[in-house]
Image (cartoon, rainbow, N blue to C red):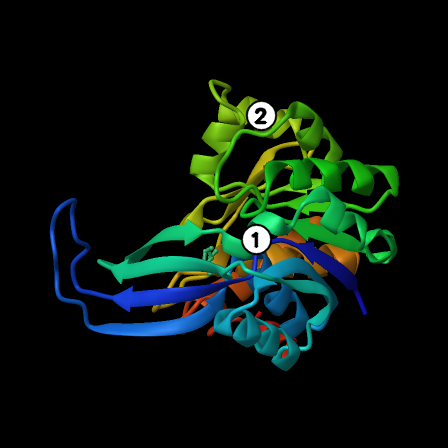
Amino acid sequence: MAKISVIGSSSMDLVVTSEKRPGAGETVLGDSFKTVPGGKGANQAVAAARLGAEVYMIGCVGDDHYGKSILDNFRKNGVRIDYVEPVTHTESGTAHIILAEGDNSIVVVKGANDYVTPSYVEKAVSIIRESDIVLIQQEIPEETVEYTAAICKNYHVPLLLNPAPARALKEEVIRQAAYITPNEHETEILFKGKDKQEVLREYQNKLFVTEGKAGVRYFNGKEEVLIPSYEVEAIDTTGAGDTFNAAFAVALAENMPLEQSIKFANRAASLSVTKFGAQGGMPTRSEVEGSL
Ligand code: RIB
């Protein structure tokens, strides 16, 4: 069984569905409102656990009602929470999501996720060292991503960095990570002014650009390849990237060949969008394998 540590955010998603997305200064009437577990870190932890990995979440929640629900959700999904601490006098992270016109828009308030600091992660070094792979995203402080990249390199544990939401990264972090999975927008921010084809060549078998419905692009040492995604009827695309990253990590940790790992992850991500909520459609192992 693959052992995976996920360092990242755990939040509550407050989701409004509406026919129309309001513009600045505009008010529209929505159709529904739901509260569901989310946060990129938590989503990736839950997705990896559903795919059969032994998952350790390293993160923080607030000492509020949302914090308790987030912890319950981890337990329900078999994610180990030995390294998830409630932070007192702080609210849990929240994501304010509008689902409209076939896509989402999200405002994230980090709350307790800002307490996932390097010294906090340091407490979990023993489990990080034992992991087959570590997953990290960017809804936590920048220094924590830098610290984690350095310790993973030091202990020879592969780090899968999902640089979302977008922010510039130090070159050292890019060098230390084993895998980086930006979308097209994040790629532009990470490699500002550089030609995408050149960057793919420079980081062969390391940089995987997720291009939504089109698939995932990378340079395999000989040529640039696009592994297409699977066509499905999408209900809610929130969490599709998280499912991709988690499934990719599970496959890599199990030593699946690279191309097969991407296909596995693409399939998992495509299934995840067929239900409401970031975690609502995240598939089990047998669902992915049965549909491949
Ligand atoms: O990647 C999707 C997640 O991003 C949502 O669950 C929301 O919490 C936002 O942080």
Q: Position of residue 217 (x, y in %)?
A: 54, 41
Q: Name the residue nearer the viewer: 52 or 155.
A: 155
Q: CA distance from mark 2 to mark 1?
A: 31 Å
Q: Helix, strand, or loop for circle 1?
A: helix
How many other residues sit within 10 Å of disc 2, few (<14), some (14-19) or many (≥20)? Answer: some
Would you say the residues marked 2 and 1 are in contact, meaning their CB atoms lie under 8 Å apart? Answer: no
Asked if residue 291 can be seen in this view, the reply is no
Say whether mark 2 is within 8 Å of ligand 1.
no
Identify the residue at image location x=65%, y=78%: 75
| Residue type of the residue flagged with mark 1 | Asn
Residue 224: name its quadrant. Answer: top right
Q: Nearer the viewer, mark 2 or mark 1?
A: 1
Please state if 43 lies on the left or on the right of 130 as rendered: left
Q: Helix, strand, or loop for circle 2?
A: helix
How many other residues sit within 10 Å of disc 1, few (<14), some (14-19) or many (≥20)? Answer: many
Residue at the top extreme of this rendering:
193
Image position of 122 with respect to 30: above or below = above
Please state if 160 lies on the left or on the right of 288 as rendered: right
Q: Position of residue 237 (x, y in %)?
A: 39, 61
Location of the N terminus (image quadrant)? bottom right
Asked if residue 174 can be seen in this view, the reply is yes
Q: Name the residue nearer the viewer: 213 or 85.
A: 85
Disc marking residue 199? 2
Q: Which residue is mark 1?
A: 113
Location of the C terminus (image quadrant)? bottom right
Residue 32: name its quadrant. Answer: bottom left
Identify the residue at image location x=73%, y=50%: 120
Image position of 96 with respect to 214: above or below = below
Please state if 285 lies on the left or on the right of 255 as rendered: left
Considering only order in the chain, which callout, 1 or 2, is on the residue closer to the N terminus? 1
Image position of 50 with respect to 84: above or below = below
| Residue type of the residue flagged with mark 2 | Val
